Image (cartoon, grey):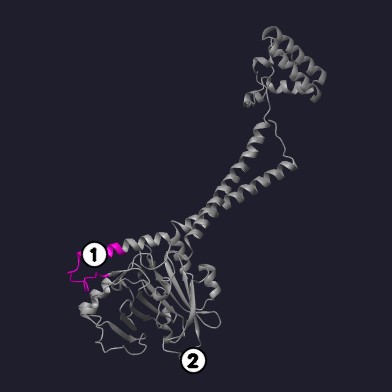
């Protein structure tokens, strides 16, 4: 069986083809993953990036994962001026497709506190990882009654104003919680329902424990967590924000706003899809107000609040920039696929063109059986006197036929082709003879 050794040029071309195919496949994978993270896998990708946050990391660490902040301003702890021993801090607010991210940074550009506020009702972000397993609740989906924690809240804040509201519970778990404060709250810039009916049955303003910063503007009765109004309120109010305060920090840094300030971030114009959601949600609220004006769980005919679709812009970038980014990713996938196809097609075409031709011009390679390779009798074309004159005795196999043919000189090979041409001229006609003669003339100089 004949083996062909690859030349240096063929080896270099083969290596280049393998590198090109690998590079094309890698580009195709990266382009597909980019499209996946911007579409169906955007929530999973955001959860992965949020779980990389931590108190003490630098602002650059955050920007490498969430881009440029949408808002920035100075932040005064406790909201009533400077607190003794605390330097001024900066508040930076980042916008992602499904959530707001607020961080407080000190003069060293280190994150002192960060807050995650969910704006997409379909994005249930589990806080277990960021709380070191001490709290379990899904932001944007779970209510305050569904919070799982081994301790009781160390602080509570309730505020229901003319157009803003918040309810928050603070937890501290000591060493198991990395000596950090964790505050779960409902932010009016996020998604989820808020049970306004509490204002009729219970207090509308509460500040207790670690979240007590000053006194309420009016005298209110205390909040009883075991009362029926409190149980109904916690079961009907969705947790949409988690605030994490780093270790060894003063609790005054836990002051509001915990998460984005709705009066600030609402100026950011939403995208087309989000505007459509807002209009649909407003129409739904109007229909609910018209049909449930006398419902027992409403206040002045207005149903329980649900911020789904009213949280502001859906994405941190304008719509045209998102579409342009997706078009670039799609173009990358198409170009990578075309490169893979071309790279694979070139060696296939070269191999096909290098296959030997028989006398009829057909590209065929006949595979010898084990008996024929051992010298068994071959076909009649190599052992009969009716075929082209041969120097091989009758009964010899194709292996002997090939060996004898290689021993012939160039003149003998040409003469035998001319004899075959004369024979075919008498049997198959002039066209076949011309074809054989042309092949003989081509074979002559190459013999």
Q: Which residue is mark 2?
A: 85
Q: Please tell me in which quadrant of the rendered image residue 255 appears.
A: bottom left
Q: Is-magenta flag for residue 444? A: no
Of residues 376 and 284, the one nearer the viewer is: 284
Quadrant of the frame with the N terminus: top right
* Badge 2 vs badge 1, beta-carbon distance below 8 Å: no
Tag nearer the camera, 2 or 1: 1
Secondary element under disc 2, as helix, strand or loop, is: loop
Q: Which residue is mark 1?
A: 288
Q: Is-magenta flag for residue 285? A: yes
Q: Residue at x 23, y 67 (%)?
A: 289
As drawn, the residue found furthest toward the top would be 426
Q: Position of residue 332 (x, y in %)?
A: 56, 52
Callout count: 2
Q: Give the Cα separation between the discs numbered 2 and 1.
A: 50 Å
Q: Please tell me in which quadrant of the rendered image residue 350 appears.
A: top right
Q: Residue at x 64, y 32 (%)?
A: 352
Q: Position of residue 354 (x, y in %)?
A: 68, 32
Secondary element under disc 1, as helix, strand or loop, is: helix
Of residues 61 and 386, the one nearer the viewer is: 61
Q: Position of residue 359 (x, y in %)?
A: 69, 20
Can the viewer see residue 409? no
Q: Position of residue 121 (x, y in %)?
A: 35, 64
> Vertically, is 126 above or below 24?
below
Instruction: Count neighbours of disc 2 (C-alpha within 10 A) and say few if under 14, some if 14 to 19, many if 20 or more.
Output: few
Q: Residue at x 71, y 45 (%)?
A: 12
Name the N-terminal-most of marks 2 and 1.
Answer: 2
Residue stretch rendered in magenta on the structure: 282-304
Q: Please tell me in which quadrant of the rendered image residue 14 appears.
A: top right
Q: Residue at x 74, y 42 (%)?
A: 9
């Amino acid at each position: 069986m004949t083996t062909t050794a690859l030349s240096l040029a063929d080896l270099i071309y083969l290596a280049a083809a393998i590198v090109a195919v690998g590079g094309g496949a890698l580009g195709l994978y990266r382009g597909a993953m980019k499209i996946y993270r911007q579409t169906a896998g955007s929530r999973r990708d955001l959860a992965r990036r949020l779980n990389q946050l931590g108190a003490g990391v630098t602002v650059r660490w955050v920007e490498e994962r969430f881009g440029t902040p949408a808002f920035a301003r100075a932040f005064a702890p406790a909201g009533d001026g400077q607190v003794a021993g605390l330097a001024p801090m900066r508040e930076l607010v980042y916008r992602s497709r499904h959530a707001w991210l607020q961080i407080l940074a000190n003069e060293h550009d280190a994150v002192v506190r960060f807050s995650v506020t969910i704006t997409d009702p379909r994005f249930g972000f589990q806080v277990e990882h960021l709380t070191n397993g001490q709290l379990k609740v899904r932001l944007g989906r779970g209510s305050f009654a569904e919070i799982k924690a081994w301790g009781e809240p160390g602080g509570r804040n309730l505020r229901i104003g003319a157009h803003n509201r918040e309810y928050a519970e603070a937890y501290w778990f000591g060493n198991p919680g990395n000596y950090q404060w964790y505050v779960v709250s409902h932010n009016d810039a996020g998604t989820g329902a808020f049970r306004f009916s509490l204002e009729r049955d219970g207090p509308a303003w509460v500040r207790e424990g670690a979240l007590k910063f000053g006194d309420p503007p009016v005298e209110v009765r205390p909040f009883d967590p075991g009362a029926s109004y409190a149980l109904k309120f916690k079961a009907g109010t969705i947790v949409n924000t988690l605030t994490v305060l780093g270790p060894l920090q003063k609790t005054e840094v836990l002051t509001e706003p915990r998460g984005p300030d709705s009066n600030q971030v609402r100026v950011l114009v939403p995208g087309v899809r989000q505007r459509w959601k807002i209009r649909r949600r407003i129409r739904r609220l109007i229909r609910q107000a018209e049909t449930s004006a006398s419902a027992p769980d409403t206040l002045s005919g207005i149903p329980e609040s649900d911020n789904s679709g009213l949280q502001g812009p859906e994405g941190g970038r304008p719509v045209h920039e998102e579409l342009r980014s997706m078009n670039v990713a799609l173009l990358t996938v198409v170009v990578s696929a075309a490169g893979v196809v071309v790279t694979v097609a070139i060696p296939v075409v070269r191999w096909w063109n290098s296959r030997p031709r028989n006398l009829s011009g057909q590209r065929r390679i006949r595979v010898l059986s084990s008996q024929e390779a051992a010298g068994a009798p071959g076909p009649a074309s190599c052992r009969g006197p009716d075929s082209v004159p041969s120097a091989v005795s009758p009964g010899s196999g194709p292996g002997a036929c090939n060996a004898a043919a290689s021993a012939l000189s160039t003149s003998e090979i040409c003469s035998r082709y001319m004899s075959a041409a004369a024979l075919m001229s008498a049997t198959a006609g002039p066209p076949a003879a011309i074809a054989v003669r042309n092949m003989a003339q081509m074979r002559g100089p190459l013999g």
